[in-house]
Amino acid sequence: MPARDIYHTAVIKALTADGWIITNDPLYLAYGGRELYIDIGAEKVTIAAERDNEKIAVEIKSFLSLSPVSDLQEAVGQYEVYRTVLQELEPTRKLYLAVPKRAYEGIFSERFGQLVINNIKINLIVFDEQTQRIIKWIN
């Protein structure tokens, strides 16, 4: 099993405060003889009888290296692999990339970052690592 991101606990607390129930820590996937571990699986039970439960998978990235572009390349590659396998195994579960506010206000807010996330259609959770709260959901 892979090591946890330094913001793992902060994201769990943020999701819980936002009404999500953590169902998998980590979310295990197996496909074609390979094993994958997405950081968190969660679901939110809705009151309305006509809606199904919402299920998400969350991959956390800290963006702490000296190269935000390298961090983004790694995150995007991992995100695409996870999204591809999730579409096959759990097509109703939506994948999110959780990033700290600092990273969102940095490379993700730049023209370069916007080009990447919009073209690849990355779902983001922006969290405040200090308050351990979700600032925004971007679909």
Image (spheres, rainbow, N blue to C red):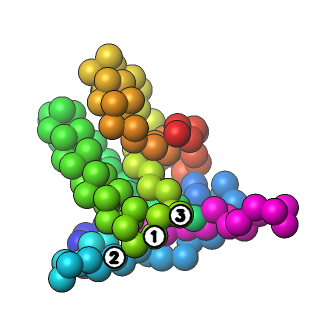
Q: Residues within 10 Å of mark 3 (few under 14, many from 20)?
A: some
Question: Does 76 appear in magenta?
Answer: no
Q: Can residue 57 be seen in this view?
A: yes
SS state under label 1: loop
Which sits earlier in the primary sequence, circle 3 or circle 2? 2
Nearer to us: label 1 or label 2: 1
* Circle 2 residues within 10 Å: few <14, some 14–19, many ≥20: some
Amino acid found under the numbered disc labelled 3: Thr
Q: In the rendered structure, which amino acid carries the disc numbered 2?
A: Leu
User: Quadrant of residue 21 in the image?
Assistant: bottom right
User: Residue 90 at what x, y percent from top left?
Assistant: 45, 70
- Residue 54: percent from left, percent from top: 63, 62
Kindly identify which residue carries mark 1: 90
Where is residue 86 shown, x and y percent of the image? 38, 65
Foreground residue, 30 or 4?
30
Residue at disc 2, secondary structure: strand
Disc 3 to disc 1: CB gap under 8 Å: yes
Q: Name the main secondary structure of what is drawn in magenta.
A: loop
Residue linked to disc 2? 29
Report the span colored magenta. 40-54
Residue 48 is one of the magenta-drawn residues: yes
* Quarter of image, res 14: bottom right
Q: Which residue is drawn at 25% across and 58% down?
A: 81
The residue identified by callout 3 is 92
In 3D space, how far apart are the residues under numbered discs 1 and 2 (Cα atoms)? 9 Å
Name the front one of labels 3 and 2. 3
Q: Are marks 1 and 2 in contact (CB under 8 Å)?
A: yes
Location of residue 121 with respect to 60 vertically, above or below: above
Residue at the location (84% across, 66% down)?
Answer: 49
Determine whether the residue tagged by mark 3 lies in a helix, strand or loop. Answer: loop
Q: Alpha-carbon distance for marks 3 and 1?
A: 6 Å
Q: Is residue 137 shown left or right of residue 120?
A: right
